[in-house]
């Protein structure tokens, strides 16, 4: 049996509502500092770009909203950490994102209002601060409301290959030498991430434990992914290890679901337990008495019919007598007489048992106080169901099977173990979809194949430069073994004796916010990238500036679709009708 240390309890953490914070003096003196918003599809991070004073974002909350049905537009909505636990509101949750692209502008505005309100930034104070937002690499920028200054984009740091592994999508982003800008034409996106891994893990465990469907929630699956999953360096070889019973016992993680250990009757007093036993005794007596009465009635009806047939023989009505014998499936009057004797004896015995049972019940009721020890012994034997012979005078059955002593073995049932989820290969199967999307039926390339595809688009010299700085960032990078797996994949795809280097962000979750903060501090007093309110009012919300850290415009040629044969024929027919000067009203 696995060690007790392999049993883990779900934390089921609840978010604590964010208080309304007062902006520190450093954000205004000597001059207003920018406000940095990392608009992630899983979590939003908001804080001030103060040099040294504010090293961390002040707000971290899930990018979801919940609005009750029938609520007015913009009203009655809860956002972020105000939701507490997400599971009771799962069916009401809404996100402004489609994959990792914010498309629902109304919900996006709710997230922004929540951020500004909890940071203590009023509409008047907001006019004084520059605002910097982040977006995933996209060919199009998006902004839902005007800000005094609002550049949006991605911040490349140095030449190399950047792998961002996020909640909804993964990106492979090549950054070339020279001006250190993103090569947007060769960037690739994989449309799966942590969200799909959580849904896949939930499906696996619900199929494995159908008795705990309601307890296997998405929030708990995300907790398992964050704290108990890892990336196998060699997936097939790791699966072979899990086939060993010893390896399984040493590495399985048992997730303890909440349960109640209180048993029925455990809080009852001795008097209540005695009363319950007496009620069970009376119910059993009433059940046996009812069964005997039903059997007596049935036997009496059969006996009356047989006696009626016998009277036909005594009266000399031979034709009707022989006809009745055929209906009864009997061959002779002697057989009829034998059945009558057996039924008469059975009816008489049943009447005696019913009478004796009634007498015993009356005696028990009258002598309850004087025979308390005997009654307790009788009730205890009823509760344990160890020997039914003790109840023979009261509950004897006519069938021989019931008259035999019955001994039942009470199984040992571990209630805590029944409420445990054993995580074996599930620990590696769920995060493996990053490398093998086919596990969940997705017809996409994995992260390793996509890296190979991006590298193949460059000459060998540029490939060699890119792989010298493979930089991993994003929440999915935090899986144990991720760096080793990427190194193994690069070793297999790169030429013999070639070199490469893989680096992991010091804080993959907050890495984007840190980059945006550093860019804001560096360009705070420059005009590069910032969009003023005047620009917004003059050129509209679709206006964006390109700068060193922004998404750039990449024209995409969409091939014209050729009309279908039926549509072409229909159009030519209409043209022919018009040439013939026939028109329809």
Image (cartoon, rainbow, N blue to C red):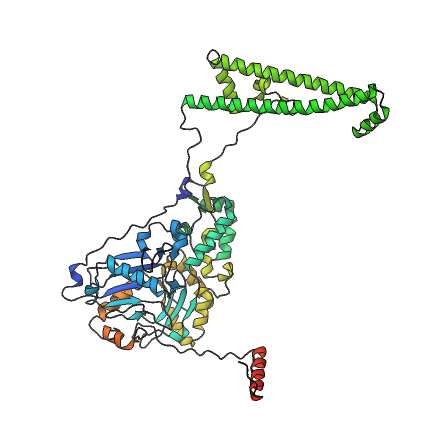
Front one among 558 and 298: 298
Residue 293 can be seen, yes or no: yes
List the single residue furthest toward the top. Answer: 370
Q: Residue at x 51, y 24 (%)?
A: 280
| Residue 496 in view in this figure | no
The vertical placement of 150 against 281, above or below, is below
Residue at image x 25%, y 61%? 116
Left or right side of 553 for 298: right
Height in image: 239 above or below 538? above
Q: Is residue 478 above or below residue 142?
A: above
Q: Residue furthest left?
A: 30
Which quadrant of the view contains residue 293? Answer: top right
Residue 318, picture quadrant? top right
Which residue is rendered at x = 29% and y = 62% of the image? 112
Q: Position of residue 177 (x, y in %)?
A: 34, 75
Displayed quadrant of residue 334: top right
Give the percent coordinates (x, y) of residue 470. Answer: 37, 66
Q: Position of residue 455 (x, y in %)?
A: 43, 72
| Residue in the picture at 38% in, 77% down | 554
Q: Position of residue 8 (x, y in %)?
A: 40, 44
In the displayed structure, 202 sits above or below 171; it is above
């Amino acid at each position: 049996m696995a060690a007790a240390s392999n049993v883990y309890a779900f934390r089921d953490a609840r978010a604590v509502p964010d208080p309304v914070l007062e902006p520190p003096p450093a954000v205004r003196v000597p001059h207003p500092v920018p406000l940095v918003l990392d608009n992630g599809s899983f979590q939003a991070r908001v804080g001030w770009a103060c040099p040294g004073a504010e090293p961390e974002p002040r707000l971290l909350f899930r990018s979801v909203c919940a609005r009750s049905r029938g609520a007015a537009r913009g009203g009655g909505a809860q956002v972020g950490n105000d939701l507490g636990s997400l599971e009771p509101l799962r069916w009401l949750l809404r996100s402004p994102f489609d994959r990792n692209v914010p498309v629902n502008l109304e919900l996006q505005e709710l997230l922004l209002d929540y951020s500004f309100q909890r940071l203590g930034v009023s509409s008047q104070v907001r006019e004084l601060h520059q605002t910097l937002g982040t977006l995933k690499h996209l060919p199009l920028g998006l902004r839902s409301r005007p800000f005094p200054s609002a550049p949006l984009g991605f911040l490349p740091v140095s030449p190399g290959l950047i792998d961002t592994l996020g909640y909804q999508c993964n990106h492979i982003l090549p950054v070339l030498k020279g001006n250190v800008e993103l090569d947007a034409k060769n960037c690739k996106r994989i449309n799966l991430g942590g969200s799909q891994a959580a849904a896949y893990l939930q499906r696996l465990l619900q199929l494995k434990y159908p008795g705990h469907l309601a307890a296997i929630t998405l929030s708990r699956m995300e907790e398992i992914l964050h704290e108990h999953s890892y990336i196998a360096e060699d997936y097939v070889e790791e699966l072979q290890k899990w086939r060993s019973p010893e390896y399984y016992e040493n590495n399985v993680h048992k997730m303890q679901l909440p349960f109640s250990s209180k048993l029925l009757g455990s809080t009852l007093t001795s008097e209540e337990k005695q009363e319950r036993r007496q009620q069970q005794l009376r119910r059993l007596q009433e059940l046996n008495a009812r069964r005997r009465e039903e059997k007596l009635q049935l036997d009496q009806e059969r006996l009356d019919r047989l006696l009626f047939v016998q009277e036909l023989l005594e009266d000399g009505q031979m034709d009707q007598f022989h006809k009745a014998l055929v209906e009864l499936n009997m061959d002779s009057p002697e057989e009829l007489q034998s059945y009558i004797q057996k039924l008469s004896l059975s009816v008489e015995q049943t009447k005696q048992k019913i009478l004796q049972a009634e007498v015993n019940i009356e005696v028990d009721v009258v002598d309850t106080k004087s025979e308390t020890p005997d009654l307790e012994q009788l009730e205890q034997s009823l509760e344990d169901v160890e020997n039914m012979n003790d109840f023979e005078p009261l509950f004897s059955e006519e069938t021989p099977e019931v008259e035999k002593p019955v001994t039942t073995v009470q199984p040992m049932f571990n209630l805590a173990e029944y409420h445990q989820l054993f995580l074996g290969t599930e620990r590696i199967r769920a995060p493996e979809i990053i490398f093998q999307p086919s596990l969940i039926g997705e017809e996409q390339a994995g992260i390793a194949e996509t890296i190979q595809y991006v590298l193949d688009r460059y000459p060998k010299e540029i490939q060699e430069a890119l792989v010298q700085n493979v930089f991993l960032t994003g929440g999915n990078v935090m899986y144990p073994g991720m760096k080793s797996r990427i190194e193994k994949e690069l070793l297999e795809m790169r030429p013999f004796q070639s070199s490469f280097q893989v680096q992991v962000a010091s804080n993959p979750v907050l890495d984007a916010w840190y980059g945006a903060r550093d860019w804001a501090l560096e360009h705070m007093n420059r005009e590069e990238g910032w969009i003023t309110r005047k620009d917004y009012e003059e050129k509209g919300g679709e206006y964006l500036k390109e700068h060193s850290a922004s998404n750039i415009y990449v024209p995409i040629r969409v091939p014209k679709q050729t009309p279908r044969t039926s549509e072409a024929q229909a159009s030519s027919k209409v043209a022919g009708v018009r040439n013939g000067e026939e028109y329809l009203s």
